[in-house]
Amino acid sequence: MRERLISLLHRSPPLPPHHGHVAQIHALLLRSDPDLLPLFLDRLLLGLYPSAAAVRHARKLFDALPQPDSVLCSSVVSACSKLSLHREALAAFYSAHRKGSPILFLAIPPVLKSCAWLPAADQGKQVHCHVLLRGLGSNVFIQAALIDFYCKTGDLGSARRAFDEIAFKDAVTVNCLISGYSKAGDVVEARRLFDDMTRRDVVAWSAMIAGYAQNGRPDEALELFEMMKAENCKPNEVTLVSVLSASAQLGSVEFGQHIGSYIESQELASGVYVGSALVDMYSKCGNIGGARRLFSKMKQRDVITWNSMIAGLAFNGFAQEAFDLYHRMRDQHFKPTDVTFVGLLTACTHTGRVEQGLAFFRSMKREHGIAPKVEHCACIVDLFCRSGRLEDAYKFIREMETEPNVVIWGTLLSACRIHSNVELAEVAVKKLVVLEPNNSSNYVLLSNIYANAGRWEEARKMRDLMRCKNVQKLYAYSWIELEGAVHKFLVDDTSHPSCDEIYKAVDGLSLQLKWVGYDPNLELI
């Protein structure tokens, strides 16, 4: 009997997760020959991927073994980690350790990955101690996993120490640390590591470009991308999505077109991931025609693609087209997300469709099970305010399930300035000075509202309050794109190399405006 079972388990293909006889075979082995359970578990694991339900079945079988061998331990931990069953991976690792089973180095990277994802910082440090006690610290895969774990749990000091202890640093470990510094916002240290690399692969370039893009430094991201192309390193999807994000942040129509043309000419926009990012970039740069053309050409679309196109139409003033696209999306059985409704509500806001906006807002929870977030509430407040319904906006704010943020109170305050509603303006400012006490625009707006209402004493007191709190007025830049370069200007700015010619042109325009009788509105200055 035993020989027949062994032969059967060895000859048969790996058991698929839906196999109808798995439970029966398990029961037979428990009753007839429990010693064959490890072999059965091994065959079962080979056929599991990618079934989470079957992995859990294997976990129960694994936990029942009195002392599983090291190979089985590694297989179970790896299978759980690959399927994002991170708690199960950690539990299996600890179960084997408690039973005194020797743990192979192969089980360490996946369990550290699970610790990073949970996150389980304390357990990950315990695994690190186990690595040191077992003398496994020199394994390159474990070293990279440790750096990745510490970076993802926000412990960059430990990540750096783990990195510095490596005798021969390869690209994998350097790339992990570059990503860690970038995600923590320290792009200076990330760039230092990047520049010290003797050979850079596409992962290193992508990590550094993503670091700049994610930290609001689009110019450096795009400059680095040009360097990457000059070194003939072919970008991957991660690189391109970061570059497109940087282009969208910059808002440069010309550079956005340049990047888009490069990606399309290299036939790199065929995937959903890059295609969706390119649609988003075209839309944010105002090239809605390019976004529509690319969207129509895409053979495959996911919900992100649809959301990017809906939002692009909404933000560029094509409200009805956004609504029509939403209905097409529903007809093709794509389930809307919270991002979808931000686009739809924005379209309603830009066209003053209050009732339609409210209908979309109510349908989120009722029809789609999506709880409105503060962004959706901000759209409704803006919709009411643009329509002059300030009392409705205030009533909506008071009834919100989420805590109103500075955007919501700021929207109400701006509307109070337009509609001269002093009472609601005072309510909004009381909230805003708590949320952002150093923002000068809130004090200035209320002071101007008082002045417009002829309440000069209150206006003076508000200016005095600014001085008392030492709140400084923030100056904003104006910027314009010319011949591929973005030029920024500040009030009384003399740093621009052509400032003399620019001021002469401005003075000339001012004279011409006076000649034609233009009377500027200086109320908000």
Image (cartoon, rainbow, N blue to C red):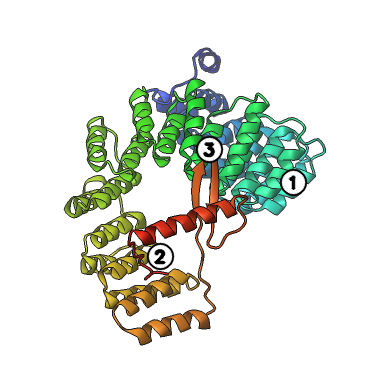
Q: Is residue 95 left or right of residue 166?
A: left
Q: Nearer the viewer, mark 1 or mark 3?
A: 3
Q: Nearer the viewer, residue 28 or 218?
A: 218
Q: Is residue 481 left or right of residue 175?
A: left
* Image location (x, y in percent) of residue 274: 47, 30
Q: Is residue 419 left or right of residue 474?
A: left
Question: 440 above or below 243?
Answer: below
* Residue linked to disc 1: 162
Outermost front residue: 515
* Image location (x, y in percent) of residue 31: 47, 28
* Image location (x, y in percent) of residue 210: 58, 40
* Residue linked to disc 2: 406
Q: Which quadrant: the C terminus?
A: bottom left
Q: Nearer the viewer, residue 523 or 393?
A: 523
Give the residue type that dot 3 points to: Glu
Tell me the residue at 68%/45% (across/down). Answer: 190
Q: Regarding mark 2 in the picture, which secondary structure is present there?
A: helix
Q: Nearer the viewer, residue 97 or 118?
A: 118
Give the residue type that dot 1 points to: Ala
Outermost bottom residue: 457
Q: Tell me the quarter of the picture where residue 378 sits.
A: bottom left
* Residue linked to disc 3: 483
Mark 1 Cα-neighbour bin, 10 Å: few <14, some 14–19, many ≥20: some
**Of pointers 1 and 3, the one earlier in the residue sequence:** 1
Give the residue type that dot 2 points to: Val
Mark 3 Cα-neighbour bin, 10 Å: few <14, some 14–19, many ≥20: few
